[in-house]
Amino acid sequence: MPDGTLASKSFYGKTIRIRDASTGKCLRNLEGHTDEIYTLIELNGNLVSGSEDNTIRVWNPTTGQCSETLIGHTKAVTTLAKLSDGTVASGSSDTTIRVWNIITGKCLKIFQGHSDIVAKVIQLRNGGALASGSSDKDIRLWDSSTDECLRTLEGHTDTVLKLVELHNGKLASSAGPKDKAIILWSNLWGTSTRSQKLEGHTNLIRALTELPNDKLASASLDNTIRIWDVISGECIKILAGHTEGILTLKLLHNGMLASGSFDNTIKFWKPSTGKCVGTLNGHTNHVAPLKELRNGKLVTGTCHDARIWDMSQFNKTLIKYSKQL
């Protein structure tokens, strides 16, 4: 958060906790949702959360007050995306996408077309268009000004869970456990969209992260990270070292990749060589969230605890200090 605090939600929890990012002290709890919180984003100093209770809540993290409750979805709110004009897009199990003014609480647009759960929504750079992935296995591209579906991309064989727009204009996507491929979509706005499958993982892909120089990293429950050349579609490196499935992947400011796993560890990788350059131990359960703070510290979490790691000594001796939250 801009004020140096850290917002987190627990697995299966209904509460958001605001902590001091330096000390780990819990400053306040944000309570109001009546069922599990699925998604949490920060927008202009506010927190926005989506829940199984069908609502979106807007919070002032300084006071802990809920300033707006956004009501309109008829089933769980599964994904949130902040848009460039300061509004928020939400996807839901009710198969719709909504765009909201979080100041007034008004729903501005409703996008209809998917036939199953909307699992992911992102904003594209091309004129502010939206892309959505769904349990109907399709990706849809939407005109955010008219709520018109511009194009439907078909090719996945399971729920589309991840969408990443690359700097070269391609869209990368991955799907549920029946579908172990990444698809690169190009010429999104041309007369004929092209697709290229990147195959090699043998289990569910849990994370996609763009790397410099036209590279893409993917992390999977097959225990590996793969580095792909998004021009040729070739897998150029396989990063092996975790002993169980990988849940999360983050590109750090120092150029390293950090990964969290079911093996309870965080590993650090040099993408150019594929070498593991360090491992953090200390968690007693699988590591899912990873967040790098502005002060250079790293926050990691499990279903039981969270830790703040001091990364300042990384290049000398890996991790001198961690604080359990």
Image: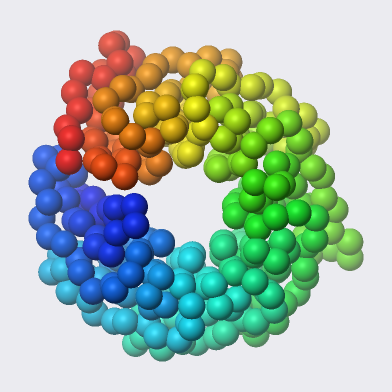
- Nearer to the camera, 44 or 288: 288
- Nearer to the camera, 259 or 234: 259
- Residue shown at 59%/68% (left/top)? 118
Residue 222, horizontal then vertical, whole percent:
60, 30
- Residue shown at 79%/42% (left/top)? 197
- Residue shown at 41%/82% (left/top)? 101
Placement of 37 over or under 74, stated as above or below? above
Q: Is residue 116 visible?
A: yes
Where the C terminus falls, by quadrant? top left
Residue 211, horizontal then vertical, whole percent:
58, 35
- Residue shown at 26%/42% (left/top)? 304
Residue 204, horizontal then vertical, whole percent:
62, 41
Q: Is residue 186 left or right of residue 308?
A: right
Q: Which of the 4 quarters of the picture holds residue 229? A: top right
Image mark count: 0
Q: Which of the 4 quarters of the picture holds residue 301? A: top left
Q: Is residue 196 left or right of residue 214?
A: right
Q: Which of the 4 quarters of the picture holds residue 234? A: top right
